[in-house]
């Protein structure tokens, strides 16, 4: 996407807020006009007072100074209020829009995106657009109004002076911003890229800090972060140097315009074409007029960084989801009768298939266990059932219809999922439980805790369900985390449970306890249970053995144990 397309798309977000933008432009122009009026009346008052006239002759100028001084402050406040109100509304809408565009991409469309880089796009890049909307959209219109207004105002009485002022304002409002934008293009883009690299490195190093320290690589990671920080600092310094140049050029143009006007006006005073008092007014009004064009240089300099941020947003948001919803979704499934036929799937063309010709019949209330070594395709099946990835060969039918005919929410609404490491959000126990069912009553929460054998533990906590679990649930143990996942699954009350090694990281005592809870919680429901611990699958109706994505054998646990097959060998050797 080129700069022009990015610019048009960013401006397009302003359409719902066009009224606010127009109001901020008018208020900004009014502020500059008040400042021009203040400088002009002040110059007139001082120059006239030097001639010792009657005080009555100065009354209008005195009132004018007071009036313009007050209106300048009031209009400046209102302009800031309007512009920032529009800007913050817009940034909030942008964040919501970006998240809505990212949601269909997850997880298949985001596997190659670093979390730190994604976070930088969602936070820093959108925040970086504040410069674009506040300093690059409204100010040019304000400068245009002031240039036209002052050119006409001065040109009516003194056409030559009005033309000189208009030319000076055009050079300041167009020439300097163009040069600033041209000079700031490279460092602006480098700053965005360096900031993204720094953010990604910080997130990676913080999330992996225990492992970094355990392997003694803290200094290496710190050196990398410092290098990224120095890169960002160099880009900022280059940007600041060019900003200083733009400010110097603006000052030069402002004062050159003033000198040209003075040189042209002094002869008018000599021949009586202009009063001496008016000369002072014209000089200060000229200086005040440049207030409208001075912000355009820094704004143009930051424009490329803002456009780069916009390009990064659109690059992520415009990615085509790998899993598309149906154009006309079928009604929600009336049952969880699951039939899989000939299912074959591979993540990328250069990788071997994760599943090959897999089939399964899971009637309501039936429980099936999946076993096999890592990479056998067990978790892939869960991802396909959740519609996280798209399959091309074979079929999955739920409730008599192809899974792809249903809306994502209707499919996932039939499923309760518990994985190896259930995610706990930085919040309270209550908020993490309500993730499964936001409308759950206190009685239902207590019942879920009792089902997961957590009621006594929560009762002993000083704040009960309002206890903070910490970032990623660091303040709860692994066993408590899995029990909370069981409670969430029970609250979900879905007819089909997908259990992806739910006891993998627990000690033997907690493993047996959580497995017993899951067996109890899932009675009467359909279950697909993935596990390396065969003792957990003794009560399954059927066990399916997978290896390299292929179905090796299947049958009841007792039947498989009696065969001299792969399952029996693993059961005897305790090794996949």
Image (tube, grey):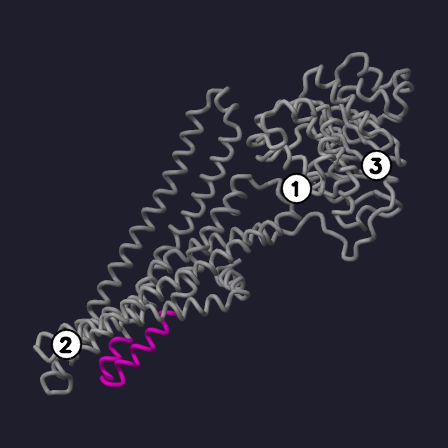
Q: What label sits on residue 357 in the rendered view?
A: 3
Q: Is residue 553 visible?
A: no
Q: Nearer the viewer, mark 3 or mark 2?
A: 2
Q: Nearer the viewer, residue 271 or 173?
A: 271
Residue 127 image point, x, y percent: 46, 50
- Residue pointed to by mark 2: 263
Q: State whether the magenta stretch is mostly helix, strand or loop.
A: helix
* Separation of residues labelled 2 and 1 (CA atoms): 69 Å
Residue 500 image point, x, y percent: 74, 29
Q: Residues within 10 Å of mark 2 (few under 14, many from 20)?
A: few
Q: What SS does tag 1 mark?
A: loop
At 76% from the left and 42% from the top, the residue drawn is: 412
Residue 95 in sight from this viewpoint? yes
Q: Which residues are magenta?
A: 142-166
The residues tagged by marks 1 and 3 sit, at their Cα atoms, a distance apart of 24 Å
Q: Earlier in the sequence, mark 1 or mark 3?
A: 1
The mark closer to the camera, 1 or 3, is 1
Q: For the residue carrying disc 1, how many other residues have a C-alpha within 10 Å: few (<14), some (14-19), or many (20+)?
A: some
**Residue 376 image position (x, y, % from top left):** 75, 28
The mark that comes first in sequence, 3 or 2, is: 2
Q: Is residue 165 magenta?
A: yes
The numbered dot on residue 107 is 1
Q: Residue at x 76, y 57 (%)?
A: 327
Picture quadrant where residue 553 is located: top right
């Amino acid at each position: 996407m080129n700069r022009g397309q990015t610019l048009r798309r960013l401006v397009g977000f302003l359409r719902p807020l066009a009224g606010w933008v127009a109001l901020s432009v008018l208020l900004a122009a009014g502020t500059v006009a008040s400042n021009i009026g203040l400088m002009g009346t002040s110059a007139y008052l001082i120059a006239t007072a030097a001639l010792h006239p009657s005080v009555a002759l100065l009354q209008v100028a005195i009132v004018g100074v007071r009036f313009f001084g007050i209106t300048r402050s009031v209009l400046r406040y209102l302009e800031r209020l309007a512009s920032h109100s529009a800007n913050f509304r817009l940034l909030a809408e942008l964040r919501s829009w970006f998240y809505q565009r990212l949601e269909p991409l997850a997880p298949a469309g985001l596997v190659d995106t670093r979390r730190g880089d994604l976070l930088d796009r969602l936070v820093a890049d959108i925040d970086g657009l504040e410069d674009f909307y506040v300093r690059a959209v409204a100010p040019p219109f304000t400068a245009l109004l002031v240039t036209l207004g002052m050119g006409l105002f001065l040109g009516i009485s003194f056409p030559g002076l009005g033309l000189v002022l208009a030319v000076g304002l055009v050079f300041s409002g167009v020439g300097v911003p163009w040069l600033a934008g041209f000079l700031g293009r490279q460092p602006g883009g480098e700053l965005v890229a360096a900031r993204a690299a720094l953010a990604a490195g910080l997130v990676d190093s913080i999330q992996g800090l225990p492992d970094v320290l355990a392997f003694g690589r803290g200094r290496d990671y710190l050196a990398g972060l410092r290098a990224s920080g120095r890169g960002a600092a160099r880009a900022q310094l280059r940007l600041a140097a060019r900003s200083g140049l733009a400010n110097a050029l603006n000052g030069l143009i402002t004062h050159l315009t003033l000198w040209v006007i003075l040189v042209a006006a002094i002869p008018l005073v000599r021949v009586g074409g202009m009063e001496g008092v008016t000369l002072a007014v014209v000089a200060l009004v000229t200086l005040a007029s440049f207030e409208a064009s001075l912000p355009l240089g820094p704004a143009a300099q930051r424009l490329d960084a803002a456009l780069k941020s916009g390009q990064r947003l659109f690059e992520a948001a415009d990615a085509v989801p790998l899993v598309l919803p149906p154009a006309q979704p079928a009604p929600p499934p009336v049952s969880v009768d699951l039939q899989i036929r000939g299912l074959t799937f591979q993540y990328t063309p250069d990788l071997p298939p994760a599943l090959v010709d897999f089939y399964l019949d899971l009637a309501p209330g039936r429980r099936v266990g999946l076993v096999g070594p890592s990479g056998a395709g067990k978790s892939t099946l869960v991802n396909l059932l959740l519609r996280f990835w798209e399959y091309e060969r074979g079929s999955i039918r739920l409730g008599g219809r192809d899974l792809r005919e249903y809306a994502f929410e209707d499919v996932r609404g039939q499923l309760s999922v518990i994985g190896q490491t259930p995610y706990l959000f930085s919040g309270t126990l209550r908020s993490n439980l309500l993730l499964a069912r936001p409308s759950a009553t206190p009685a239902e929460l207590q019942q879920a805790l009792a089902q997961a054998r957590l009621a006594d533990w929560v009762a002993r906590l000083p704040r009960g369900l309002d206890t903070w679990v910490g970032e990623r649930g660091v303040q709860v143990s692994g066993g408590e985390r899995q029990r909370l996942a069981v409670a969430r699954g029970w609250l979900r009350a879905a007819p089909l449970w997908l259990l992806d090694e739910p006891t993998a990281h627990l000690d033997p005592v907690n493993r047996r306890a959580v497995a017993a809870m899951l067996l109890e919680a899932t009675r009467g429901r359909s279950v697909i249970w993935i596990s390396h611990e065969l003792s957990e699958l003794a009560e399954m109706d059927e066990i399916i053995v997978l290896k390299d994505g292929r179905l090796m054998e299947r049958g009841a646990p007792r039947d498989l144990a009696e065969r001299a097959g792969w399952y029996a060998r693993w059961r005897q050797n305790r090794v996949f």
